[in-house]
Image: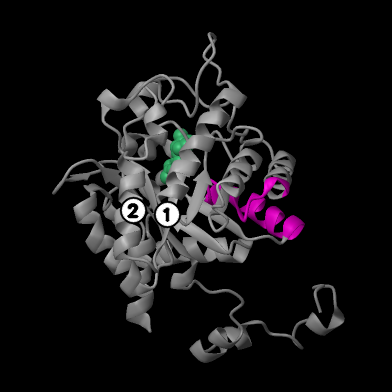
Amino acid sequence: MKSPANSLLNFPGHRPRRMRRDDWSRRLMQENSVSTNDLIYPVFLLEGQGKSEAVASMPGVNRVSLDLLFPVAQECVDLGIPVLALFPVIDAALKTPDGKEAFNPKGLIPSAVRELKKRFPNLGIMTDVALDPYTSHGQDGVLDEQGRILNDETTAILVQQAVAQAEAGVDIVAPSDMMDGRIGKIREALEQKKLIHTRIMAYSAKYASAFYGPFRDAVGSAKNLGKADKKTYQMDCANGDEALREVALDISEGADMVMVKPGMPYLDIVRRVREEFDYPTYAYQVSGEYAMLKAAAQNGWLDHDAVMMESLLAFKRAGADGVLTYFALEAARLIKAAN
Ligand code: PBG
């Protein structure tokens, strides 16, 4: 009974408000729901100890040193959040044009992964594969003379970065760089090293979006990047079919999960990917989306908890299996309190 043209759906024979009348009948016909199992929590990691810095453009988000991340990881475990996603804030002194600190096995991220897996063996840990936190120019790879990113040279470094993270014990590597062919190269290297359990979540349809602004403040790449953009590798926001080609490539190259990013303005892409591939599909509710909702809520213009849960539900309705969201902890606490 899909078609509203069906004669059975004519008024007054059919009164849709009947099923909306009571809480129990609304619950009975609810098609989608948000559970804690759907949430991936992105966090920003600082070098050192006892350090916590607020991110001005992301109210409620702090960049913290590893010791202060342990209680956060513990809360994720207690609430049942499946995965913590780590993003590093790298000392300016360690940034180079080629971003080689990215594959230092003793670097901030591999060290944090080892410590977290030791203490929280059942919490999934995910790491970003991209060079932007590590490059002196803030781009996700190495540049040619015109300032364009060199694809294959960058991929060779990304492979080393992914292997360093996997050898440290990370559960999911998440290439967010948008180089061509990197999923295949990373998968091949992981196989060669017998790192057969490392999952790959590919940022497959990642757009050259202005919604990443607050994230670039948080990891400290904004000032290095300056007025430059990422349009030679991230996708044109005008395109939809291209996203499906990117997803097809990443699946064929060995991705275990695919992602669409940003989230809310790209729910049409999430839905198309879900329908076309029926493959584990995730969406990233990015920093700018979070900042928007937080700012409006702080002004009293939106009901914080209501819009948070509504936005997460929208991802599920669009067909996502899960959401990377800075709201993960707050949403999980709310879900727990309601049960
Ligand atoms: C790095 C990366 C970015 C984000 C995740 N990984 C920024 C970018 O591509 O410039 C954005 C996440 C967010 O905005 O919340 N490649």
Q: Which residue is mark 2?
A: 114
> Can the viewer see residue 209?
no
Residue drawn at (59%, 61%), measured in percent from left and top?
Answer: 320
What x and y, as percent, mark residue 289? 43, 48
Instruction: Report the quarter where the N terminus lies.
Output: bottom right
What amino acid type should be assigned to the residue bearing mark 2? Answer: Arg
Quadrant of ligand 1: it is top left
Is residue 255 found inside the magenta-colored segment of the image? Answer: yes
- Asked whether mark 2 and ligand 1 are closer than 8 Å, the reply comes as no
Q: Vertical placement of 321 versus 286: above or below?
A: below
Identity, as a three-letter code, of the amino acid under mark 1:
Gly
Q: For residue 20, what is the image quadrant?
A: bottom right
Instruction: Give the left or right position of residue 249, taking residue 64 as reference.
Output: right
Q: Which residues are magenta?
A: 252-277
Q: Residues within 10 Å of mark 1 (few under 14, many from 20)?
A: many
Q: Is residue 67 above or below residue 130?
A: below
The residue indicated by pointer 1 is: 169
Q: CA distance from mark 2 to mark 1?
A: 6 Å
Q: Are marks 2 and 1 in contact (CB under 8 Å)?
A: yes
What residue is drawn where x is 49% and y is 36%?
A: 160
Comparing 8 with 192, the one in front is 192
